[in-house]
Amino acid sequence: MINEALTFLAEELNEHFKTKFKFNEDIVVLSSLKNADGTSGVSGENKVVLTLINIEEDAVSRNAPVNKVDTRAFIAAPINIGLQILVSTVFSNNYPESLKYISEVIDFFHNKSVFTNQTSPKLDTGIEKLIVDLSSKTLEESTALWQMLGSTYTPSVVYKVRMLATG
């Protein structure tokens, strides 16, 4: 479900950019910033990159009741997880364009932070809801993140995505 959730968010952002800026190609990609061999993980130039940086269990799911099937068998409730994603802009030699696109990402998720099957029919049916929240990082945390990724800093923002699975 992680791939489905992040692919969906990339597609939503792509649709938004295509509508807003009137172009046809996808600019948002789901990718690591660096490959294991140290080469760039982003093919092409002028991209907005979604990168998964952490997975955690949503604390609410840990305490969720177990669904009783019959008196002999029990099925655990679906696991709800939190994903931390880094959204970064990779625009070589065009810093103002990077700022334009990262601002637009922030605006998009500020105005549309909850996705359900009712409001977003393209959302995978195995996902009940995605909730996207801005995650503030200190300068030290951001520095450590970029060092961990082995990449050069570009304008970016971190979001926590709460993914609720269907039962």
Image (cartoon, grey):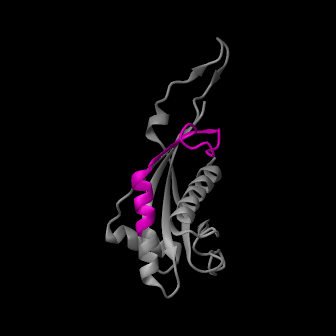
Q: Position of residue 116 (x, y in %)?
A: 54, 40
Camera-side residue of 30 and 32: 30
Left or right: 10 in relation to 58: right
Q: Is residue 52 above or below residue 153?
A: above
Left or right: 107 in relation to 70: left
Q: At 47% from the left edge and 42% from the top edge, which residue is drawn?
A: 58
Q: Is residue 150 above or below residue 73?
A: below
Left or right: 28 in relation to 148: right
Q: At 50% from the left edge and 73% from the top edge, which residue is drawn?
A: 89
Query: Is residue 110 magenta-colored?
Result: yes
Q: Position of residue 33 (x, y in %)?
A: 57, 73
Q: At 40% from the left edge and 68% from the top edge, which residue is drawn?
A: 103
Camera-side residue of 73 and 127: 127
Query: Is residue 125 magenta-colored?
Result: yes
Camera-side residue of 103 and 167: 103
Q: From this viewpoint, is residue 152 visible?
A: yes
Q: From this viewpoint, is residue 155 visible?
A: no
Q: Which residues are magenta?
A: 103-129
Q: Position of residue 26 (x, y in %)?
A: 63, 67
**Residue 121, quarter of the rendered image:** top right
Q: At 64% from the left edge and 11% from the top edge, which residue is drawn?
A: 71
Q: Is residue 122 above or below residue 105?
A: above
Q: Position of residue 35 (x, y in %)?
A: 64, 75
Q: How many labels, in total?
A: 0
